[in-house]
Amino acid sequence: MAIKYIPEPFRIKMVETIKMLTPEEREQKIAEAKYNLFNLRGEDCYIDLLTDSGTNAMSQEQWAGVMRGDEAYAGANSYFKLVEAGQDIFGYKHIQPVHQGRAAEKVLFGLLMGEGKFSISNMHFDTTRAHVELAGARAIDCVVAEAGDPSIRAPFKGNMDLEKLEQIINERGAENIGLVIMTITNNSAGGQPVSVENVRETSKICKKYGIKFCIDAARYAENAYFVKQREAGYENKSIKEIIKEIFGYADMFTMSAKKDTIVNMGGLLGIKEDDDLFQAIKGRTICFEGFITYGGLSGRDLEALAIGLYEGLDENYLRYRIGQMEYLASRLDDAGIAYQAPVGGHGVFIDARAMFPHIPYYEFPGQALAIELYKEAGIRTCDIGSYMLGNDPDTGKQLEAEFDFTRLAIPRRVYTQAHIDVMADALIAIKERASSIKGYRITWEPPVLRHFQAHLAPLDK
Ligand code: F0G
């Protein structure tokens, strides 16, 4: 029996019409898109779950903030409001706005990484990995083993494997580790949370070896909500207190603000206390993003972001938000559809290998399910698996991802229970004809981040 859906803690003031194409039209659109869902037009998708990034619905307070945005090139009010909000929530001395998460990575990584260096993370997001590689270094993932088994229900499947972390540091040499990065929540492992204890222990290891510790903070508020629900000793702490403690263990953070701060564009870089590093960051920000008091954003974006930083911490909102995922997951449980369990914070990651045991990783089961969801119900999702992972940068060989997921990333405050039911019904219909679904091959691919642009073709056997 599906669990109760937690009613939305808001009402709707403005609507956007969406349309459903016919099955024949969808077949044609996806073929024209070369079976790459990034090539579809947004208007051809009935429910767009490609990402939870920048697809959020802003509140009336944020829209009012847009009107108040101060567009001064230097020293805008909106900048100071944002910096004060960041200092208040994270407890860091330096807060630098940038235009999105990967911009923060670009500005920071070039200062800490280069040829012969390594970055170790509980899991690098794809752009994070790309920026490590562009800086000349190599990225090593170090997530706990239970993350690799979607059927194991553990409370903190996003955690760093602490033993393995120390082993990698010793093997590669502490002086060669540019950065240890903790991604909260762990997106690539299925939006899985990381415990405060695991952050604390990782921080101790970094201190022991003199390595800098960075948080990839895209979904820090959802992570804090899970901590409050699941970690002993945190049930009576506020979301803000939990966040302060987590960030207190790190030296710096990069953040895509397009997720938990519920805006459409923005990013942040935070430095706890290192004035020299921040000085260098300011120089690179001016080169890559624009003057330090706007960092690639309009004043109105800075203002909406400052407001969103607080809205994202509201517990009523977080209960509904995580409740939406739990409702969808419970419908999948009823239907025997496997996903990364327990469900994560920003979406449901369907175990495409379990759905299509006859499709090997190099024929991209996660992508096959994403295409099928579009054909079935006009739902746009994406592969988080071998198709996304790509080829080894040194050998050029297709890598086998730890898992092959199809991610239904749920935009914040956008879809209703009825939409969630459409998602569940579509997955159930696909499961019924799963054995007839074929894999795909790549007919063209660019050298980096290929999944955004590659062309595919269906296999006929
Ligand atoms: N880190 C994590 C954990 C992310 O999930 C993302 C983006 C980034 C960094 C990069 O941030 O997009 O603002 O430049 N994730 C989006 C997603 C795109 O769909 O998961 P960005």
Image: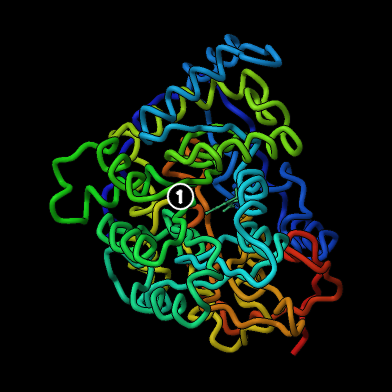
Which part of the image, by quadrant, shows the N terminus? bottom left
Examine the image and state in which quarter residue 278 appears: top right
Residue type highlighted by circle 1: Ile
Q: Is residue 38 shown above or below 298?
A: below
Which part of the image, by quadrant, shows the C terminus? bottom right
Position of 192 with respect to 46 (left or right) is left
Residue drawn where x is 34% and y is 53% of the image: 327
Find residue 335 and report its horizontal and vertical position in percent.
38, 70
Residue 441 visible in the shown view = yes
Examine the image and state in which quarter residue 134 appears: bottom right
Give neighbour class at mark 1: few <14, some 14-19, many 20+ (Cα, 10 Å): some
Residue drawn where x is 48% and y is 41% of the image: 274
Position of 417 with respect to 315 (left or right) is right
The number of discs equals 1
Q: Is residue 240 shown above or below 381?
A: above
Residue 415 visible in the shown view = no
Mark 1 lies on residue: 420
Q: Under tag 1, what secondary structure?
A: helix
Find residue 379 and report its horizontal and vertical position in percent.
61, 54
**CB at disc 1 and ligand 1 closer than 8 Å:** no
